[in-house]
Structure formats: C-alpha cells, structure tokens
Amino acid sequence: MVKRVQLQRSETAKNGRGANGKFAPGNRIALGNSAPRKAARFRELLFRTVGTDAFVRIVQRLIKEAIRGQPWAVKLFLNYLLGDPVPIDIMSDLEEMKQRIDAFQKSRQL
C-alpha cells in the first residue's frame, strides 16, 4: 500500500505544487517557456508597424526576385503559396489507407 503524503500549505507555496504534486494555480516557479510569448509580441509589433502599402511592395519585390530566378525567392514564394511539398511516400500511404477503409466499410455492409 502506497502512503500518500499531503503537502502542507507552506510547502505548497514553497515548491509551487499542490497536494497532488501538480503545479498549483498561481505557481511562480514554472512560468513556462517565454520564447513563444516574446515571439508573439514581436509579431504583433510587426503587424502594427507594417502597413498595407509596405506589405504589397515587399511581396512585389519577392515576386520580382523569384521571376529573376533567385533560388531563395522562388523557394520562399512557393513555400508560402503552396506550402511545403508532401513526400510521395506519404501520398502512397494515404492511398493505401483509403483503400483499406473502403474495404472495411464494404465488409461491414454485408
């Protein structure tokens, strides 16, 4: 039999955990990773700073560089327009999975 130890209120405040061992509300010890919050603040600042005209000019410049054949511009343009390429083996796996699902559904209808 495992004996569970209840943390006293002073211990909970000291280590930031509740009686169940999980982080308690208001825990100041484990505030999490600050990098995503900082990146979100920078992104918000960027959105507030760059106006529509500047954004259009930047995109036009990117397109111009892609048309000129700059590899970095072509890659960036296509990645944002089409997304990352899907590996072929994933496509064949998806097709195989679809066939299995269809076969399963047909067997359930009998």
Image (spheres, rainbow, N blue to C red):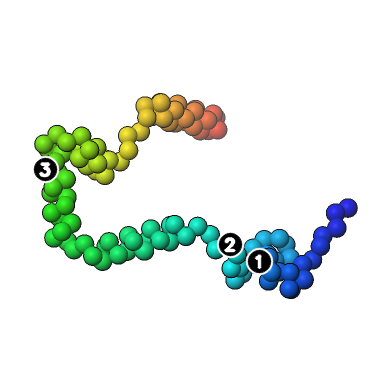
Q: x, y (%) of residue 68?
A: 11, 36
Q: Amino acid at mark 3?
A: Lys
Q: CA distance from mark 1 to mark 3?
A: 55 Å
Residue 82: name its quadrant.
top left
- Residue at which label 1 appears: 16
Q: x, y (%) of residue 110?
A: 55, 30
Compare marks 2 and 1 and give the one earlier in the sequence.
1
Q: Residues within 10 Å of mark 2 (few under 14, many from 20)?
A: few
- Residue at which label 3 appears: 64
Left or right of 33, for residue 3: right
Q: Residues within 10 Å of mark 3 (few under 14, many from 20)?
A: some
Compare marks 3 and 2 and give the one earlier in the sequence.
2
Q: CA distance from mark 3 to mark 2?
A: 47 Å
Q: Amino acid at mark 1?
A: Gly
Question: Helix or strand or loop: what does disc 1 sit on?
Answer: loop
In the drawing, what numbered circle is on residue 30?
2
